[in-house]
Image: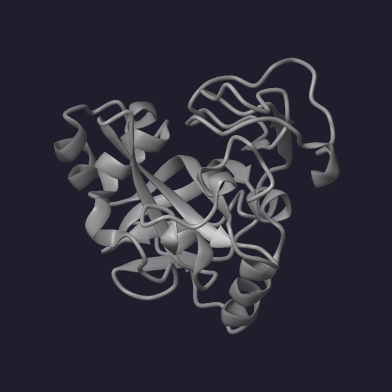
Amino acid sequence: MTVPPPDPGADARRAALFALPSPAAASALIGWTLAVDGVGGRIVETEAYHHEDPASHSYAGLTPRTAVMFGPVGRIYVYRSYGIHWCMNLVCGEGPGSAVLIRALEPTMGLEVMSERRGTNDIRALCSGPGKLCQALAVTHEHNGMAADKPPFSLAPGEGAGSIVGPRIGITKAADVPWRFGEAGSRFLSRPFPAVQGPSPPRSELRGGRGEF
């Protein structure tokens, strides 16, 4: 089990991360280590969502389902995708309604536990997708609203090996917005990025109807 060394500036770095707009936070999270009860790994893929983004759950406003997104930053927002898989997000931003979907991890801690939960010994298949990583880390709706930097969660700063950018996956609104971020060269991504990437557009360019993801 690989445990990141103590970082005396970690609290300040986490606070700064939580305050970032979601696209910036999604990019900055690449290389950080996320774990639940000591099981987890390095974040290698994320997606950003914002309350002005028609692909976001928060676009329709505050609801019982999205209440965590409108609460304090640094909390975990968990929802079930298509009634099948749990998905885990980190609430962040300078205003309410923004979050970062954790799409993939490079497993580094608790691999045997992950393998048992996932039913596979293929390390690349343990956390290479938002539903897979929630199953591997045993994240469910019971974790909804918990702090990302307090037990059972831990979130440690780290550095990625360079980021790549592309459009988000599995949405029908604002599908061309390049708010998906990944670690360059990682073997643990949920799927490859397109050959051409571009910079994130300003939020003012986001237009459309209600999000669906």
Residue occupying image coordinates x 29% and y 69%: 152
Quick check: 212 above or below 153?
Answer: above
Nearer to us in this view, 33 or 138: 138
Residue occupying image coordinates x 56% and y 78%: 7
**Is 90 on the left or on the right of 207, as rendered?**
left
Residue occupying image coordinates x 75% and y 15%: 195
Image coordinates of residue 68 in percent, x first then y, are 43, 63
Quick check: 157 above or below 181?
Answer: below
Image coordinates of residue 141 in percent, x first then y, are 26, 53
**Is 188 on the left or on the right of 133, as rendered?**
right
Residue occupying image coordinates x 68% and y 73%: 16
Nearer to us in this view, 161 or 37: 37
**Is 15 on the left or on the right of 212, as rendered?**
right
Count all numbered tags in the image, as a single digit. 0
Image coordinates of residue 208 in percent, x first then y, are 70, 30
Image coordinates of residue 165 in percent, x first then y, are 72, 32
